[in-house]
Image (cartoon, rainbow, N blue to C red):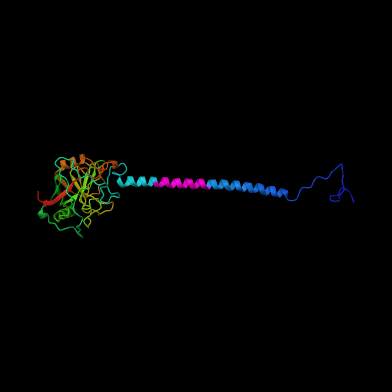
Amino acid sequence: MSGNNPGDGSQNPKNPTPPSVPRGSGSKREKEVARLKAERQAARRAEREAAQKRKAIWGGVIAVVVAAAVIGLIAWAPWSSGTNTVTPTPTPTVAPPTPSATASVADCTPAPTPRADNMSFKTPPPYSFTSGTVLTLGTNCGAIVIQTEPVKAPQTSKAMLGLAQAGYFNLTKCHRLTTSGIYVLQCGDPKGDGTGGPGFTLPEENLPKAGTNNYPAGTVAMARTSAKHSGGSQFFLVYQDTTLSPDYTIWGHITSGLSKLQAIAAAGTDNANQQGDGHPNQPVVIVTATTGKK
């Protein structure tokens, strides 16, 4: 047997047999390298996932803040985008702050306590135009006289005169004043917060054409929600030429008391942060509402 065959135990000093490599040692190193690589990959993956979670959380927080800001602006925005078409609505989403009880306009007396909202009707109270077509609002700031429109707006005029004759408007406050974009004092809600009504609704009548100042100073028109035929008892008194979408029934015009309205408006609102849309600084309460002839 040749001495060069591996495993025969012979020695060859000129060509020594190289030391043998233990079986499996290369496999262990590969496994260790693979393990370290997997750990690094897992660490990077965990970091990416954590970063994505942080990004999602911050994105959610920002979205909530932005949504809240947008909702707040919508709830109080005094006009729609770029058209100066304000919606005098009897259903605000945010309750305005409580007005001051201190009179600030000359000839105004302290406002009396409004009555409870304890009257409701399934249909408009009956009224005969033979009893007259004039509605006089006796307020703590003086009388506002309204000539109704029994020909152009018969249903609305009759309903408003019938409510007045039934005492519905007595001791109710005018809860909303706008002094930017539109120029109106809104009244006719016994709840005093813009959410009240008489229990029935009215269709639209005598709508003006679209255009600039289509609700001129002295106009008396119905407030309504965004839905059609949603007018009830709330109405607004226009004290300065105003441009609105032609959706609000014009049922009368002011023949006396417009200058008093303008003085009330000049005193401003109690909500300076809402661009001139809030309670009037000068509280206004309809003490009595009476009907009659010219």
What residue lies at 64% left-to-right and 49% top-to-bottom?
35
Horizontal and vertical percent for residue 291? 12, 52
Quadrant in which residue 79 is drawn: top left
Horizontal and vertical percent for residue 80? 30, 44
Quick one: which residue is furthest to the right in this view? 1
What residue lies at 42% left-to-right and 46% top-to-bottom?
61
User: Is residue 66 rendered to the left or right of residue 176?
Assistant: right
Quadrant in which residue 264 is drawn: top left
Q: 226 and 32: which one is in front?
A: 32
What residue lies at 69% left-to-right and 49% top-to-bottom?
28
User: Is residue 6 rendered to the left or right of residue 179?
Assistant: right
Q: 211 and 89: which one is in front?
A: 89
The tally of labels here is 0
Residue range in magenta is: 49-64
What residue lies at 32% left-to-right and 46% top-to-bottom?
74
Question: Residue 287: in sight, yes or no?
Answer: yes
Horizontal and vertical percent for residue 128? 12, 56
For residue 223: magenta? Answer: no
Q: 41 and 178: which one is in front?
A: 41
Question: Residue 133: in sight, yes or no?
Answer: no
Quadrant in which residue 218 is drawn: top left
Horizontal and vertical percent for residue 140? 15, 46
250 up-or-down from 105: above or below = below
Quick one: which residue is furthest to the bottom in this view? 122
Main secondary-structure element of the magenta-colored stretch: helix
For residue 62: magenta? Answer: yes
User: Is residue 22 rendered to the left or right of residue 172?
Assistant: right
